[in-house]
Amino acid sequence: MNSQTFKTEKIPLGIVLKALEKRFDIRFTYADKTIEGVEITEPSMLLSYNDAITYLRTNTNLNFKIINSRFVAISPSRKVTRPIEPLEEVLLTTYLTSGITKTKTGEIVINPDDFGILPGLIEADALQTVQALPGVISMEETVSNLNIRGGTHDQNLILWDGIKMYQSGHFFGLISAFNPNLISNVVVSKNGTSALYGDGISSTIDMRLDNDINEESTAGLGLNLIQADAYTKLKLKGNMELQLSARRSITDALNTPTYQQYFTRIFQDSNIEDASESNQNSTSNETFYFYDISAKLLHDLSNKDKLRFSFTTIFNALDYLENNLTSTLKSDITQYNLAAGINYTRQWSKFLSSDVRFNISDYKLKSNNFNPDTNQSLQQNNEVLDQGITLQLKLDFNERLRWINGYQYSNVATTNLENISNLNFSNNNENTVETHATFSEFSFSSYNNKTHLKVGTRSNYYKPFNVLLLEPRLSVNHKLFKHLKVELLGEFKSQVTSQVIDRQNDFLGIEKRRWVLANNTTRPITESKQASAGLHYNKNKLLVSAEVFTKKVNGITTRSQGFQNQYQDINAIGSYKTKGLDFLINKQFNNISTWLSYSLNNTKYNFPTLNNAQDFNSNTAISHALTFAGTYTINHLKLALGFNWNSGRPTTTPNTQQPIFDNAINYNMANNTNLDDYFRTDFSGTYNFNFVKNTKAELGFSIWNLLNRENTINSYYILNNDNSISRIDNKSLGFTPNLSFRVVF
């Protein structure tokens, strides 16, 4: 950012703040002693609002907290951070767009308050934003199926304020289930994960809420073509604050173009669409809605003691009524995740602090599916109850050396119920896994600030199986030259939860995956080993980054991989190995940021009992993926345009010489070919303005798939009653516009 200044002499910070207040119509709130004696080189007049705040953070030893679009709070720099937090030092000030940074220990940090704009997005949706990072892709265009370095979605650890979440999407995956209004930052780790984290053998996505009491109360309202939302950060007294947010869909009251596109995309391959097309003598009516409510209470008991309570509930519901000549038949599906946590921190001395956390996450997926042809109803339930406690002790020897030790206990129980009327069939499976884990981790920065090291280990004892696994973790970042850094990351990880598909039409064919636990026989503990090496060049706002990686995962099952070919009804145990490259070139000008990212992925399955024990292409192996995008900011206007291309999803075709054998489809080798190339163009824009006194407003507009290209995102085959074969293609979202209006006061 220093290259953006015209002057070299330093002036009092107070003068700079007054100039920025006038220029951006904002107010800085601070105590006079906070900025007393602080001097800074005057920033360039060409800097945008977000870049100006970033410049102040980078060039002063102060904390700048954006309360809303009008107020920015300044406080002294705190040497002590939350024990779960990464090192605060930043490797890159801006990554792709404002509000996205990279730490010196390899994590990507997304800050919704500072977020600029990305193509197709008009809000800082955490799980949509993650997909802009190299190496992250969703083959189904959903936030409930993120594929990172060959992994399936259930191999991502998704945390909301330290609590594991088992539901990540609204509208069955098209919208993130996490309201960005209360999220302070999102920390994404693809490798070299901190030893504090268990689970998540593909990645960790840690969404953190504000943990410090704000200077003033704020509130906001928002509306778009799918939902309405509101939030507030209410200061109850000097040492207490209540944060609240709520969202609800408007889709059951208003049929918008956005909703129509979402509905077509989600229900195109479900029992609902099948019933509508097969029965010409009936009419149908669907009612869908979702909501989420989040809250956090912050109470500073003293200067040394802090108490925090977090709560969220996420809910989706669909009712489907089918009216025939004689009766009205009802099918429905509901999905929700309720989570709560209590956190107590104590600063015992300048060097020693402790943290105690209690968490609970309760997930339920229920459906009732009535089949008029057989006059039967199918009831299916999937439930997860996750309870845990985490104890941490952190010792800061100095500003360069930190040592964290801790213990973590978790008890996870799953239930899978299935009832079929008329047949008097009932099946109920319940499983529980207790895990005892310890972790220890050192973080070190050299005197010359050229080397940053994080090394730790985690031990997981899975009680039901009497299995102890040791998991070393490593992150090294070293500055070779002034503008060139090398990064080495590595980790061992394991997890006992996974999502499986028993039948493609489970849960009305809408939410096919159900959570299950490892039993260490037919469902082993999943284990991974990963290593990566990267080079990062950063000079004059030009970033060139390249990272090569390799990962081996053992203990996967065919049920967890979503096969729709000859292996669909087989339960086999195997592994996958992935090798690849993530590349990014990002050039930033005064008001323009452009980037090109490319990912190479070679992921192979190995199932000893399948394919003659030979390796074959993974279901998630998108060999090549490329994104070219740019953002433009001028005054209060932000624009973004992006192009996304990939080489198509693997698929399996029937044998052309003998397509049917023994009354079944005779397939070629699994994943013998790929679907056609995928290509999508997205656009978005936002405009900020003063609505009324002390109230800021933002108008947003976005178009997903601007060129309305028809992309096939999945393809499979079925055998008809007349012994013919039909190909079923699932299509991507078409031309999908959205409008938003938001006020902050």
Image: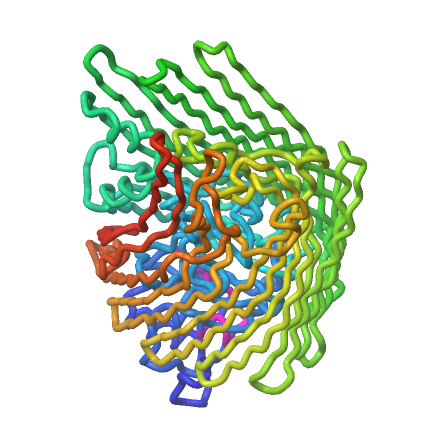
| Stretch of the chain drawn in magenta | 55-67
> Would you say 548 lies left or right of 137 here?
right
Residue 681 at x, y = what percent?
29, 63
Q: Is residue 577 above or below residue 317?
A: below
- The colour scheme used here is rainbow
Q: Is residue 126 visible?
A: no
Q: Residue at x 49, y 84 (%)?
A: 539
> Would you say 607 lies left or right of 370 here?
right
Q: Residue at x 47, y 11 (%)?
A: 423
Is 253 in front, or is 742?
253
Q: Residue at x 52, y 69 (%)?
A: 582
Residue 1 at x, y = what percent?
45, 80
Q: Residue at x 65, y 61 (%)?
A: 192
Q: Is residue 420 above or below residue 471?
A: above
Classify residue 174 by image quadrant. Answer: top left
Tally of numbered tags: 0
Is 550 in front, or is 716?
716
Residue 496 at x, y = what percent?
66, 40
| Residue 86 shown in magenta | no
Is 364 in front, or is 357?
364
Q: Is residue 529 visible?
A: yes
Residue 657 at x, y = what percent?
43, 50
| Residue 61 shown in magenta | yes
Classify residue 682 by image quadrant. Answer: bottom left
Is 434 in front, or is 699?
434
> Would you say 152 lies left or right of 434 here?
left
> Would you say 310 lies left or right of 368 here?
right
